[in-house]
Amino acid sequence: MMQDCGFNFKFNLMRNLIVACFAVLSLHTSCSKPEKLYYIKLSGFAQGTSYHITYGMADSINLSENIDSILRDFDMSLSAWEPNSLLSRINRNETDIIDEKFYKTYEVAERVFRESEGAFDLTVMPLVNAWGFGPGDRKEVDSLLIDSLLQFVGMQKVRIEGNQLVKSDERISIDVNAIAQGYSVDIVAEYLEMLGCVNYMVEIGGEVRTRGKNAKAKVWRIGIDRPEFGNNLPGMNLQAIVELKDRSLTTSGNYRKFYEENGIKYTHSIDPKTGYPAKQQLLSATIISSACIDADAYATACMVSGLDKSIQMLEKLKDIDAYLIYSAEDGSYQIYQTPGMAKMLVE
């Protein structure tokens, strides 16, 4: 009897060990198996432009209402086209109290202002309005008007104290159009990451941020448009394609935002030093950075600075890659690209 009990004990012990081993093996297999992701594509309109967002998550949850709400909240802070936004009220001197979004925008803008030697300037709004690229009425521009407006331009004339924006003159107004769109991309991307999403592509008005891979398990590919007047449909006529992994990309150019009057093209890149639209051989500037807000600001700074000064600035910056398209004397397109950018281009 004792022998039988010993045998049964050993048998049961062996059986339990085998079952446990299979359980551990099964658990290991299920944990290491790639999780199935559902890729959702969203599109809509915000900030006077369109957006396209693709994300992969374990649940096929549609986040369109949440994202639209985030973008509406963003507009109520930083949109110059929304009359009741915080920015609009600051420009009308109805308040000087700023929020977190305004503070972040100012912080980045002030840094890029210094690094670009004043080419990027948030106080350019009076000039932007005068030339017809802002929410204000376009004016009959002449040298007297420009001289009168330049006295209200210069980031050294504003500062933040606590939670207040202090202006040296109440006629100073702020334009965040060249940086806010990139910032909105970051905010949507950070919302997705907060939900645990590690595979996404967020594009708003041509400003892009990606993470992880697409539905085909490939690195996201983003096109750089050829900077030709009339090339108004993004992606239709490409100059290059970039594999963008866990970074942001923005392109600034003068081939879409312009108007023509009496045979003269007036572009939206206003030089805050001269007060006039920048006239450069640089046709477009594509910047890649970790944060889209940075890429957006640097791309604008390049378009105002021109080719040579842009290259000088870019060579001093870390975590920034660039693809600049400029016209040669014979009218042909020429390229300047950073070493990091060259590695991301698709052959």
Image (tube, rainbow, N blue to C red):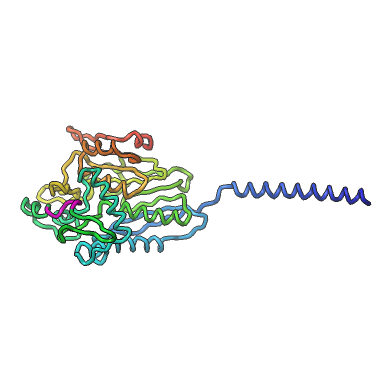
Above/below status of 79 relative to 282: below
Asked whether the viewer can see residue 124, the reply is no
Q: Quadrant of residue 102?
A: bottom left
Q: Magenta stretch: dominant SS?
A: loop
Above/below status of 104 relative to 223: below
Outermost residue toward the left? 144
Instruction: From the top left corner, tell me how far across and down residue 152 is, in percent.
Output: 14, 55
Q: What span is in magenta?
A: 151-156
Q: Is residue 15 left or right of residue 237?
A: right
Above/below status of 1 relative to 137: above
Which residue is found at the position 48% from the left and 44% from the top?
Answer: 217
Asked whether the viewer can see residue 48, the reply is yes
Instruction: From the top left corner, tell me how far across and down residue 200 is, in percent.
Output: 43, 50
Which residue is found at the position 43% from the left and 47% from the top?
Answer: 211
* Magenta span includes 208: no
Instruction: From the top left corner, tell me how far across and down residue 161 is, in percent.
Output: 26, 58
Q: Is residue 312 left or right of residue 56?
A: left
Which residue is found at the position 36% from the left and 44% from the top?
Answer: 222
Above/below status of 261 relative to 313: below
Is the C terminus in the top left, top right, bottom left or bottom right quadrant?
Answer: top left
- Nearer to me, 181 or 233: 181
Outermost residue toward the front? 162
Instruction: From the top left corner, tell me how far across and down residue 21 is, in percent.
Output: 72, 47
Outermost residue toward the right? 1
Q: How many numbered discs?
A: 0
